[in-house]
Image (cartoon, rainbow, N blue to C red):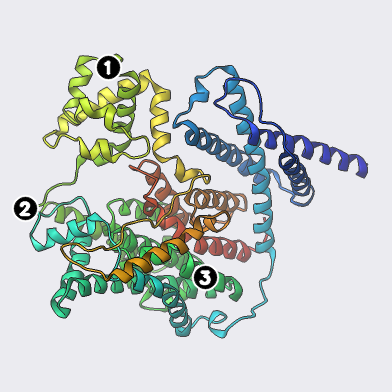
Amino acid sequence: MENTAAVKRWGAAAGLAWLSSLAFSLNVLDPVARAKEQTVEGMALTVLLAVFYHWAMEKTPADSRQQRRMLPLAALLGLFTLTGLSMEASDSLAFLYSGLVCLAKAAAVWAGYAVLIYFCLRAVFYGLDRLAASPGRSRKGPGWLKTASPKTMLCSMGVILLCWLPYYICLFPGASNSDTWWQLEQVTGVQPLNAGHPLLHTFLQSGLILAGKTLLGSWNAGVFLAVLVQSLSMAAVLAYSVHFLVRLNVQPVLLGLLLALYGLVPTFPRSATILMKDTPYSFSVLLFTVLVLEAVLLPEQFAAKRYKKPLAALAAFLVCTMRYNGPVLLIGVLLFSGPALWKTAKSSRARAALAAWLVLPLVLGYGISAGLKALPGVEQANPNETLSVPLQQTGRVVRDFGDEVTDEEREVIDRVVQYDQLAEVYTPWLADPIKSYINREDATDADRAAYRQVWMAQTLRHPVNALEAFVNLNYGWVYPGVTNPCWSYSPVADNDYVTRPAVLDRLEALLDKADFAFLLPVTSWFENLGLAAWGLLALGAWLSARRVKGLGGALSMQYLTLLMCLFGPVFFGHGRYGWPLLFCWPVLLAAVIFAARRNGGRA
């Protein structure tokens, strides 16, 4: 019987491995039913997959509850992979309308990748189960990584800042994009105030630059002061996350690896030294995530320190005011962690304190942002920002089916964007050319309401074309197969405000080459936003399978971030929208394991 079961396992593993290797060899856009020639490497891969699948079936048992999480998730991630492969090859989902052969090949590719992902999920779930069941007693390492203390904060900050030192030097006085100077010129009166960026961030960042210029006499000094304040704040938040994980009994060696991640992976030093709203927003999301987890997992410690609640309130306020989508994240925490926190707050005083750090910042932050936007003389943000996806879909319809657009539809569209340029400027991976470069500044709310009706009618006429426009714009957020540096933004070069010695340009070129090592296989995983999204989805599925409660608020902030990225204006070249995913996943992973371990390590 034992031998028969082993033979069946090997047979199933071999068949599924063949299906997965077939998925690697099929071209879903080729209308001929053929695969690539089988190579020695391909056969070796099939054998390796068979061994892996057999090991997973034998060594990683999964109960029905886990299966109900893994199977749909594997199917979904397999679908993401199929669409990503198709988009990389043709900027389209042509397999949907290129005949039955292409459709059948696409189904085989989807099934093969779904099988591979399923067994990877089994291995991940098994690893998490083992971690949750282990006592975690080995504590070898330096004392400041074994016992949480002020020294933990100071030493962690020291390690991080030492690793960031080359970036301070090579990017002196600091990195920027065009918005940095646009915001500065709004504060200096060169340009009118504009609500395109949160005005509180505009005032804070530009105020620091002006303070440095006034006190130290140069724009270089002003920019460096702003970078220094921002980067020190971010380093302190990262160090506090290490302090928190020490209290969750994370092994010192793992904390050392986390410090290496914070110090060496380019996303962290690059984001710390560039002046844009996404940096304070992202580290505020991390700080608020840590404090919410602390309130849930270590309530006595959270209540014992008086500074915790004001710090949580400050973090929540910054999340609300550094980006306009910040309030959505707080609403997620209120919905998914608020009731549990309310129950644990037994007294009226405790509940008032909870409202003060969880609800009040949301009300104040939203109110202040709305009030600043309503000030006299403030230009409002481009209303087309909320139409990024619909305008992309319209642009693709006009490009592909322009002869079907009626005169009435043309007139309605032209009142919002310049119709005659739509097909020409449509860029599949970027919404800016349509929503910003050819928009009609005199368009009214009524014009946009009429346009939405036209957009809906066109979407119903050409649903696959509309789907292609949506997927083409943002598929990289959920497809790990693309390379997208999260930090490739222009440094501060010579302009009307700052000057740089030529030697710094040469040093910066060397730093760029070093950073591109993190775009190589394996090292690129630490900055792969699609992989981070997959990991967070798998973490939530495992948590649900184990019935561990209380962490929904912290996880919801990441899922809402991902959802907003999917409906955003761009993926390629703008990984900064996904920085919260990269900043928070290590803390969430440790918190999930701690919560499961505290639950007795039982599934």
Identify the residue position indicated by label 3 in the image.
260
Disc 1: CA contacts within 10 A as few (<14), some (14-19) or many (>=20): few
Q: Please tell me which of labels 3 and 2 falls first in the chain.
A: 3
Give the x, y percent position of residue 95: 52, 24
Give the x, y percent position of residue 452: 26, 28
Write down the quadrant of residue 369 in the picture.
bottom left
**Residue 137 visible, this orientation:** yes
Q: Quadrant location of the N terminus? A: top right
Query: In the picture provided, is 19 more to the left or to the right than 147?
Result: right
Q: Amino acid at mark 3?
A: Ala
Q: Where 160 sits versus 41, above or below?
A: below
Q: Where 40 sits versus 553, above or below?
A: above
Secondary structure found at label 3: helix
Identify the residue position indicated by label 1 in the image.
405
Query: In the picture provided, is 470 more to the left or to the right than 77?
Result: left
Q: Nearer the viewer, residue 234 or 503?
A: 503
Rendered image: mark on residue 47: none
Q: Quadrant location of the C terminus? A: bottom right
Give the x, y percent position of residue 15: 77, 34
Residue located at (83% from left, 41% from top)? 10
| In contact (CB < 8 Å): disc 1 and disc 3 | no
Query: In the picture provided, is 69 more to the left or to the right than 476?
Result: right
Q: Amino acid at mark 1?
A: Val
Q: Nearer the viewer, mark 1 or mark 2?
A: 1
Q: Please tell me which of labels 1 and 3 falls first in the chain.
A: 3
Q: Amino acid at mark 2?
A: Pro
Secondary structure found at label 1: loop
Query: In the picture provided, is 333 more to the left or to the right than 95?
Result: left
Write down the quadrant of residue 391 in the picture.
top left
Rendered image: mark on residue 376: 2
